[in-house]
Amino acid sequence: MAGLLSDSERRDWLRLAMSENVGPASFRLLMDRFGSAGRALDALPELSRRGGLSRSIRIYGRDEAERDLDRAAECGARFIGLDEPDYPPLLRHIDQASPLICLKGRADLFGKPAVAVVGTRMASALGRKFARELSLAFGRAGLLVVSGLARGIDTAAHEASLETGTVAVLAGGIDVVYPPENARLHGEIAERGVLLTEMIPGTVPRGNSFPRRNRLISGLSLGVLVVEAALRSGSLITARLAGEQGREVFAVPGSPLDPRCGGTNKLLRDGAALVTGPGDVLDVILDLDRRSRRDLTGFVEPAAIEQEDEPEAALEADLRSRIMALIGSSSVEIDDLIREAQAPAQAVLTVLLELELAGRLERFPSSRVGLTG
């Protein structure tokens, strides 16, 4: 793992992460290939041109990045890079881990095993009460409670775990209070817990911000507990993402006559662990924590693919079109694509990176890629 970033490196990391079509996976590929964010920024125009972008790629400006860093510092927050010690260890190892997170509060809390408690914004009185009781018990048992600072179940979970440790994952900027009625809770968590987001300061949350936020909630946690959720609920997205990330999924059963329990009952039918009290979660999470600490201690970062002197010269003239044809109209695993393309892995990965930077490729969980449009 790398050490602390210098001020100029942090600025360049932010510029690269915020540049057009640079996602978490392409960020890491660029860093592996070029060794620094500064050199990667210099290479973006040519790489995107080779991928088929007919105009200049939009690169995040130096002044914009400096402004974002200053705004974070002004409100007592800071940007933390993926390889820095204060980056949450569980979050570091998920697919699509954010290159940078903006954090305010006690990073030392990430030393605790974490469980996410989420649910509907339109929670019942009983649902709120049970979320508080569970979160209070989790905190007293030494767990960190993670949620999304939304109305309803999220609010109840945060309030109950303020004393013992809670993390609010935000869909907007670190300085943007949403929902407005949680302004006091937002401030209390900043002082006693952790506020965390991958957005730059000043970002107002929009519809697609919440699924992005949800993958961080599950990624920070060893398990996700859904207390109340309708069949069409963001909490079910969090539960699905938890499953994709190899996290445990728990659900509280509810009346089949209450639409707020339709999603949780479905989770139970689909194999989620049933929860009627804190012990149903604690035993599992504490065991997972012991195993994850052992696994993370032995974790070795994948080695970067060795680069040839002129990798582009080794690409066959028709490799890009062959790869696009192999992907077709659906997504495909990258390992299968490399095998079917009958080309060096480095050459295939280079083409995929170029296509992504040109806006022609989308990445999905489980190392799958698909064409856009």
Image (cartoon, rainbow, N blue to C red):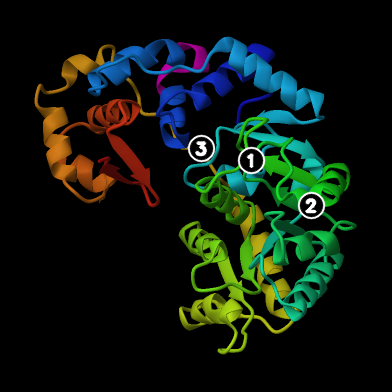
Say which label, 2 or 1, has the lower sequence index: 1
Tell me the kind of residue under disc 2. Answer: Asn
Q: Secondary structure at mark 2?
A: helix
Residues tagged 3 and 1 counted as in contact (Cβ below 8 A): no
Q: Residue 184: x and y, percent?
A: 86, 49
Mark 3 crowdedness (10 Å alpha carbons): few <14, some 14-19, many ≥20: few
Spatial separation of the CA atoms under disc 2 and disc 3? 39 Å
Query: In the image, 160: left or right of 233?
Result: right
Q: Residue 49: x and y, percent?
A: 27, 17
Q: Which segment is the magenta one?
A: 33-39
Q: Which residue is mark 2?
A: 182
Q: Which residue is mark 1?
A: 172
> What number of labels is visible?
3
Q: Residue 301's mark?
A: 3
Q: Residue 65: x and y, percent?
A: 61, 18
Occupied quadrant, residue 273? bottom right
- Asked if residue 193 shows in the view, the reply is no
